[in-house]
Image (cartoon, rainbow, N blue to C red):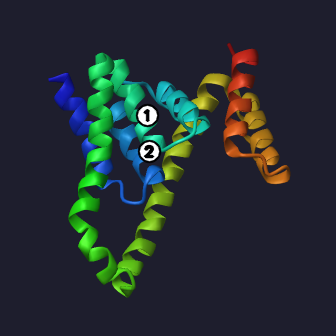
Amino acid sequence: MMWLQIFWAFFITNLLGYGGGPSTIPLIQTEVVDHYHWLTLQEFGDVLALGNALPGPIATKMAGFIGYKMAGVTGAIIALLATILPSAAAMVLLYKFVNAFKESNTLKSLTRGVQPVIAVMLGILAYQFFAHSWEHIGFLQTAVIAIVSFWIMQRTKVHPALAVAGALTYGAVFLS
């Protein structure tokens, strides 16, 4: 039963996650934190931070880790297959239509229409992480991490993965 739940959780999130990683992250969070309770919000935030610090697609890294945590190597394989399957099937089945509709104004409008929804979903996720952080480590620590990370990324144009790594290091040294 666990294998089926893992498959369904990652299959449906990646089937509905139009737009890639940013759109699937809140959907994955809803499934693994809110629906199945496999992870806490804190654990999900840690998985997301580590996944962002590593190269490659975020959804597959998160799926592999969560699948492994829940059902070992088999769970990781099932979660990865469920993550990849919707995109692979769509590419194979819809390849013929790509050239026919690539200049379609309707398709371009649909894509532009989805972008605000993804932004709101990511905003809600960021708010949840911020509120959780504020609750557990306090306003001062949360503000220091947020302001310093933002400043470093804006002023020095450092890659966000390095800002995440710095925040993780700060947390490990000062908050453990």
- Residue 37 visible at all: no
Q: Residue furthest right?
A: 155
Q: Give the mark, 1 or 2, whose residue is nearer the N terminus.
A: 2
Q: Residue furthest left?
A: 1
Helix, strand or loop status at disc 2: helix
Q: Where 149 falls versus 140 (above or below)? A: below
Q: Is residue 108 left or right of residue 137?
A: left
Tell me which amino acid carries mark 2: Ile
The location of residue 61, given as percent across then percent down, is 45, 35
Q: Is residue 59 left or right of residue 11?
A: right
Could you give the CA–CA distance between mark 1 and mark 2, rounded to whole angstroms? 9 Å
Helix, strand or loop status at disc 1: helix
Quadrant hosting residue 149: top right
Tell me the residue at 34%/84% (across/down).
106
Instruction: Check the picture and name the quadrant holding the N terminus.
Output: top left
Q: Mark 2 — residue?
A: 25
Tell me the residue at 60%/27% (across/down).
135
Instruction: Check the picture and name the quadrant holding the C terminus.
Output: top right
Residue 93, label in figure: none
Q: Is residue 135 left or right of residue 40?
A: right
- Residue 5 visible at all: yes
Q: Nearer the viewer, residue 111 or 94?
A: 94
Q: Mark 1 — residue?
A: 62
Q: Nearer the viewer, residue 36 or 109?
A: 109
The location of residue 67, given as percent across then percent down, is 33, 26
Q: Nearer the viewer, residue 164 or 72?
A: 72
Residues under numbered marks 1 and 2 in contact, where contact means CB atoms less than 8 Å apart? yes
Label 2 neighbour load within 10 Å: few <14, some 14-19, many 20+? many
Tell me which amino acid carries mark 1: Met
